[in-house]
């Protein structure tokens, strides 16, 4: 089954996978502590505005909490910035998702996102017909296509590497690249899986 991009978040752990039929020549690269989805050097040029973006950004809140924002597009930056300003995760997700709305491409592709803390997690999606934002207490998946309603997902991962590998290897079509993260107190670990 093809579900496009997907996020899995639970307390202390998260992952993001790019699956793509149309733009397979991409990878996740680390720029400081932010992870970015970028074209590989051999990728054909495109003017599609939705295929390169920061997919994962750790932040510190005004109360000293460490949180990580992740998702499938340019909304990840404003989600991270709202968290940094002290917005609760629900509001930090809801406002940018609603403001930017679903993507204006041929598929009305939803925007999906998550927030992970040491002991907390929230997930969100904005589709053409709905905005859903939920706090979750166990790993939860939401995807751009087919699986576009958050649902429990078994993420068997003790580390960021295991989280990235688990979603990269998940049984959904057209895996391209993936990111994983763990949050343990103030410590954030990230990992990438580019199928090399
Ligand atoms: N975030 C991404 O990595 C991403 N990759 C592709 N898209 C959008 O989704 C459309 C469909 O892509 P695909 O056939 O690869 O699933 C693309 O034309 C593009 O507008 C994306 N936008 C949202 O998921």
Image (cartoon, rainbow, N blue to C red):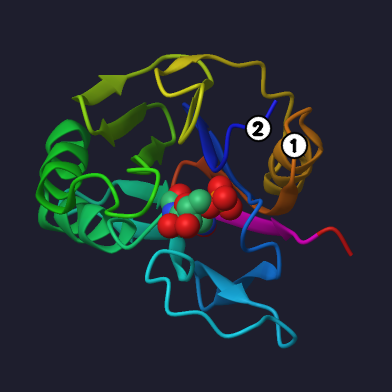
Q: Main secondary structure of the magenta part?
A: strand
**Neighbourhood count class around disc 2 (C-alpha, 10 Å): few under 14, some 14–19, many 20 upward:** some
Residue identifier under label 2: 2
- Measured as percent of width and height from the top left, residue 99 is found at 10, 50
Residue at image position (10%, 44%) is 95
Residue 13 falls in which quadrant of the image? Answer: top right
**Residue for point 17% across, 53% down:** 100
Q: Is residue 116 above or below residue 120?
A: below
Q: Does mark 1's beta carbon lie closer than 8 Å to ligand 1?
A: no
The outermost residue toward the front is 106
Q: Secondary structure at mark 1?
A: loop
Labels 1 and 2 touching (C-beta < 8 A): yes
Quadrant (top left, top right, bottom left, bottom right) of the N terminus: top right
Residue 187 appears in view? no
Residue at x 15%, y 37% (from the top left corner)? 94
One can see residue 1 in this view: yes
Secondary-structure class at tag 2:
loop
Total number of numbered discs in the rendering: 2
* In the image: residue 95, left or right of residue 159: left
Q: Is residue 185 above or below residue 154?
A: below
Please state the horizontal and vertical placement of residue 27, each as a whole percent of the image.
67, 68
- Tell me if 100 is positioned left or right of 170 in this view: left
Task: Give the residue displayed 63% in from the left and 51% down from the top.
Answer: 20
- The CB of the residue at mark 2 lies under 8 Å from ligand 1: yes
**Quarter of the figure that contains the C terminus:** bottom right
Q: Is residue 19 left or right of residue 110?
A: right
Q: In front here: 101 or 92?
A: 101
In this figure, which residue is indicated by the disc labeled 1? 173
In the shown orientation, is residue 51 left or right of residue 92? right
Residues shaded magenta: 188-194
Q: CA distance from mark 1 to mark 2?
A: 5 Å
Residue 34 located within the stretch drawn in magenta: no
């Amino acid at each position: 089954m093809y579900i496009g991009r997907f996020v899995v978040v639970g307390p202390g752990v998260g992952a993001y996978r790019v699956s793509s039929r149309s733009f397979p020549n991409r990878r996740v690269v680390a720029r400081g502590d932010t992870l970015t989805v970028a074209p590989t050097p051999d990728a054909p040029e495109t003017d599609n505005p939705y295929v390169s973006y920061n997919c994962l950004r750790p932040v510190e809140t005004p109360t000293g909490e460490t949180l990580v924002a992740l998702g499938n597009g340019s909304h990840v930056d404003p989600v991270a910035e709202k968290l940094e300003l002290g917005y609760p995760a629900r509001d930090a997700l809801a406002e940018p998702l609603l403001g930017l709305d679903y993507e204006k491409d041929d598929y009305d592709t939803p925007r999906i996102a998550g927030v992970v803390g040491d002991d907390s997690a929230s997930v969100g999606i904005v589709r053409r017909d709905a905005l859903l934002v939920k706090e979750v207490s166990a790993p939860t998946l939401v995807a751009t296509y087919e699986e576009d309603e958050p649902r429990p997902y078994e993420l068997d991962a003790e580390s960021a590497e295991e989280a990235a590998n688990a979603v990269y290897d998940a049984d959904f079509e057209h895996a391209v690249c993936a990111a994983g993260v763990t949050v343990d107190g103030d410590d954030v670990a990230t990992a990438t899986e580019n199928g090399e």
